[in-house]
Amino acid sequence: MPHLLQGVLAVAHTPFTDRDEIDPVALKRSVDWAFGVGADGIGTGMVSETLRLTGDERVALAQMLVEFAADRGPVFAAVGAESTKQALAFAVAAERAGCAAVMAVPPLTTRLGEAQLVDHFRAIADGTGIPVIVQDASGYVGQSIPVGACVKLLQRYGPDKVLFKPEGAPNGPALSALRDATDGAAWIFEGSGGIFLIDSFRRGIAGTMPGMDLLDGVVAVWKALQRGDEDAAYRVYFPLCAIVALELQAGLDGFLAVEKHLMVKRGLFPSALRRRPYGYELDAETADEVDRLFERMQHALAERP
């Protein structure tokens, strides 16, 4: 049911050991921290480096998140893959692991027409008994999903089964277009890392799916918006979105480099190791600016009521 998926749903980063294996100790530490600072749920997404994991690792990661979440909130799993058969297999495995929902982007290596996109997501929806979050991540990777395809999926399955995470540019108008095309029936999440959060909130989102690196800030902004305290929301939002702006300059690799840098700074991960190959390294000057902005965000959090 969609009401199980709402509010701030944290997307977990995948910590790696020096042997390039998933570090379960660091992962559990980050999950405990996420729920401790107010996450309503947790799951995997593009910044979990799912597309760089082996098939066995993706299944194991979902299983670990369900175990570590320990019923403190719903767990969702990213199941996007290059074939419908792969995506469905990951979705079935996630459901068996106890996930409350799955999230899928379209295949990245081929461009599909609207009818083919609908068929792809229908196969995932028909093959599982849990909700499917249709993710358009075209703002930084892959192809966009036409609003028409989303409308057809919603009409067929209803808002309890099919949910949406539109991240195609321009984000705000894309979100509103989906909202308006479905007469407000679509259950919509945003995933901008926080940089569009206030604008998205005003457009009627059900929740947000940020990475963990700025999670305490995103939770604070979300709660301030819910209670109508715009001064508190903007006080935390300004340094938060300035950090995300630095992440955006290098696409997905930029997000990962900065986010893992901050996970180490928080003491949650022992290292900022990422799965290779990647095309961006965090330089010292950018890291220094991220650190300055992070301190400003922490000061703003300390000032909030």
Image: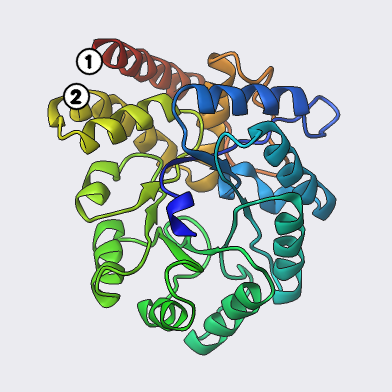
Q: How many marks?
A: 2
Q: Position of residue 56 (x, y in %)?
A: 84, 51
SS of the residue under disc 2: helix
Q: Is residue 36 left or right of residue 242?
A: right
Q: Could one spot residue 201 in this view of the protein?
A: yes
Comparing 294 with 278, the one in front is 294
Q: Could one spot residue 112 in this view of the protein?
A: no
In front: label 1 or label 2:
1
Residue assigned mark 1:
305
Where 57 sits versus 69, above or below?
Answer: below
Q: Place residue 238 in its image quadrant.
A: top left
Mark 2 Cα within 10 Å, few/some/many (few <14, many 20+)?
some
Where 36 sits versus 135, above or below?
Answer: above
Please, what is the three-letter code of the amino acid marked with disc 1?
Pro
Mark 1 Cα within 10 Å, few/some/many (few <14, many 20+)?
few
First in residue order: circle 1 vs circle 2: 2
Residue displayed at 81% across by 51% down: 54
Residue displayed at 36% across by 12% down: 295
Spatial CA distance of label 1 from label 2 is: 8 Å
- Find the residue positioned furthest to the bottom: 115
Q: Is residue 282 left or right of residue 49?
A: left
Q: Position of residue 276 (x, y in %)?
A: 73, 41
Residue assigned mark 2:
232
SS of the residue under disc 1: loop
Please, what is the three-letter code of the amino acid marked with disc 2?
Ala
Where 233 sits versus 29, above or below?
Answer: below
Q: Place residue 216 in its image quadrant.
A: top left
Q: Is residue 208 left or right of residue 197?
A: right
Q: Position of residue 22 (x, y in %)?
A: 78, 34
Q: Are marks 1 and 2 in contact (CB under 8 Å)?
A: yes
